[in-house]
Image: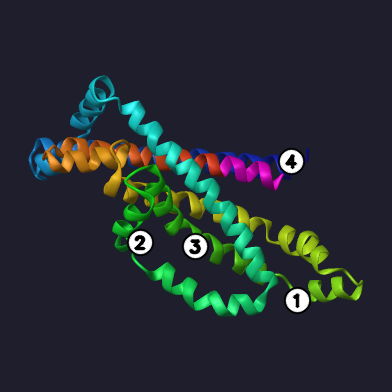
């Protein structure tokens, strides 16, 4: 290993340490500031709670309100909706890419559905699917599906036209261009859509739980609002942030493995 390469690796290591240090510093500073402002009543402790109250509430939820069951319920719904969403997004994006006329027909409808507030469809979803887990998964699919389709489809369309011409010059069939050029060349775009899809899925699941659930983190937040226990609300929000962070890191690990 050359000295230049060793110096470069040391530089990368220093950057990682600096980034990690400031990430932890910002988090600790925020928690301390939150605690101080709440104790000094500079912010309303009833509304905004405090880190110590949140920890006490999470402990109480764990001991008396089956917190793990609520977390696993939300995670189960997220995983099912995520797998369905990314699979359907990929299949539909491939179909739209291969059949340009069909894409021109449905494009305005995709745009309209994407811009439609999905909560407005909540009552209709409940009537059709019932007040159960199915409604929550459908709500999540409505949010993550269109975004996934558009993201993957745009990745397919960004293929270098010269490469497509080169394949056609060598008399490649349509399926060869799709499976040996379009999809492999869009690999990073497809993987990047996983990051967007997981966040959209979590949003959709929580929105669904707000409407119909009797379990899950979304249910806990609504319950805390109904009984005016904002410590439960803040605890639910903190748990959601942690879940979101963990899911994002898992997608990053999956991305590294898939790219290799």
Q: Earlier in the sequence, mark 1 or mark 4?
A: 4
Task: State the residue lying farthest toward the right.
Answer: 170
Crowd around label 4: few <14 · some 14–19 · many ≥20 (10 Å): few
Q: CA distance from mark 4 to mark 3?
A: 46 Å
Task: Specify whether residue 46 is painted magenta.
Answer: no
Q: Tell me residue 130's x, y (percent).
A: 34, 48
Quadrant housing residue 128? bottom left
131 lies left or right of 112: left
| Image position of 146 (left or right of 23) | right
The residue lying toward the viewer, choosing from 181 and 29, is 181
Residue position marked by numbered label 3 in the rendering: 147
- Choose between 104 and 253: the one closer to the eye: 104
Tell me the mark number nearer the camera, choosing from 2 and 1: 2
What kind of element bears circle 3?
helix
Q: Earlier in the sequence, mark 3 or mark 2?
A: 2
Q: Where is residue 110 drawn, in percent x and y?
A: 49, 71
| Residue located at (73% from left, 64% from top) | 182
> Do labels 3 and 2 touch, CB within 8 Å?
no
């Amino acid at each position: 290993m050359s000295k230049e390469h060793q110096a470069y690796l040391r530089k990368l290591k220093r950057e990682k340490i600096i980034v990690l240090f400031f990430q932890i510093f910002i988090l600790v500073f925020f928690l301390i500031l939150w605690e101080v402002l709440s104790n000094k009543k500079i912010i309303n402790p009833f509304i905004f709670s405090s880190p110590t109250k949140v920890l006490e509430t999470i402990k109480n939820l764990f001991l008396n309100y089956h917190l793990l069951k609520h977390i696993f319920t939300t995670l189960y719904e997220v995983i099912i909706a995520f797998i369905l969403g990314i699979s359907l997004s990929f299949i539909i994006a491939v179909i739209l890419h291969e059949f340009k006329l069909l894409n021109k027909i449905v494009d305005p409808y995709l745009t309209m559905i994407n811009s439609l507030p999905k909560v407005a469809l909540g009552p209709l979803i409940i009537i059709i699917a019932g007040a159960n887990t199915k409604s929550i998964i459908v709500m999540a699919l409505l949010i993550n599906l269109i975004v996934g389709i558009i993201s993957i489809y745009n990745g397919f369309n960004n293929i270098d036209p010269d490469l497509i011409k080169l394949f056609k010059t060598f008399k490649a069939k349509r399926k060869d261009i799709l499976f040996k050029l379009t999809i492999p060349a869009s690999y990073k775009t497809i993987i990047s859509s996983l990051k967007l899809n997981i966040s959209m899925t979590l949003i959709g699941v929580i929105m669904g739980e707000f409407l119909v659930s009797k379990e899950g983190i979304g249910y806990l937040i609504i319950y805390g609002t109904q009984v005016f226990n904002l410590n439960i609300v803040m605890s639910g929000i903190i748990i959601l942030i942690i879940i979101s962070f963990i899911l994002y890191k898992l997608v990053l690990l999956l991305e590294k493995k898939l790219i290799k």
